[in-house]
Image (tube, rainbow, N blue to C red):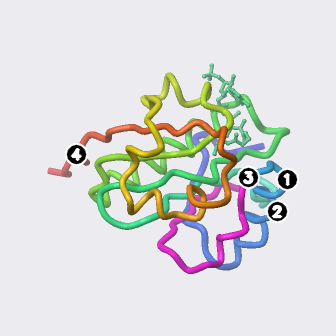
Amino acid sequence: MISDPPRIETATGTDWPEVVALLAGTGLPFEDLGEGGALEVLVVRDDAGRLVGCVGLEGEGSQRLIRSLAVAPALRGHGLGSALLAAAEARARTEGVTTLYLLTLTPAFFDHRGYHPVARDAVPEAVAASAEFERLCPGDAACLTRALDPAVEAT
Ligand SMILES: CC(C)(COP(=O)(O)OP(=O)(O)OC[C@H]1O[C@@H](n2cnc3c(N)ncnc32)[C@H](O)[C@@H]1OP(=O)(O)O)[C@@H](O)C(=O)NCCC(=O)NCCS
């Protein structure tokens, strides 16, 4: 069971082994996670404390990569993936990100969530230099992008 709404938190070092296990089990790249580039990971746990979902926001500056969106198979279809994506987008907005990019083998999940296809050679160098783009994602992965509205300032 998951709290409603799910409590999505920033991962710490102690979450790392479970993040890697979830990504490995899902077939998503994890090999570069310890390479030291700028990466924020958000995670969600079930009521028993098991890590059941994650999403990453990689890079610095106004253009970044969404990656590693994964939900444990038994919990899919209940809105957790959407909540994680929305949380990563909200985090990105607060950090001044204006454009997100991602590579995925499941583009259908993203196509009514504000993302649209973009040519790989139109992706800015800062994002295209990531390990996902350079070596980890298969060449047939769809490349998608989304423009973000600026964060709404608290009044
Ligand atoms: C994609 C993923 C994160 C969705 O998680 P989730 O908790 O099931 O997502 P939600 O419950 O919020 O939404 C379910 C929606 O995703 C769709 N969906 C789930 N898996 C899908 C897949 N493999 N291909 C296409 N659509 C998929 C469902 O049909 C449903 O559609 P709708 O809400 O738009 O009508 C999850 O299926 C997953 O971990 N997949 C493997 C890893 C992956 O592909 N990650 C994305 C690329 S980084």
Is 31 on the left or on the right of 79, as rendered?
A: right
Q: Does 92 appear in magenta? A: no
Q: Nearer the viewer, residue 106 or 121?
A: 121
Front tag of 4 and 1: 1
Ligand 1 rendered quadrant: top right
Disc 2/disc 1 C-alpha distance (Å) = 6 Å
Report if the CB atoms under discs 3 and 4 are less than 8 Å apart.
no
The mark found on residue 21 in the picture is 2
Identify the magenta region.
29-46
Task: Give the label on residue 152, or none.
Answer: 4
Q: Residue furthest front?
A: 121
Residue 89 at x, y percent in the picture = 42, 47
Please report whichever mark, 2 or 4, sits nearer to the chain's N-terminal start: 2
Q: Earlier in the sequence, mark 4 or mark 1?
A: 1
Compute the Cα span from label 3 to label 4.
32 Å
Question: Residue under circle 3?
Answer: 28
Q: Residue at x 76, y 56 (%)?
A: 23
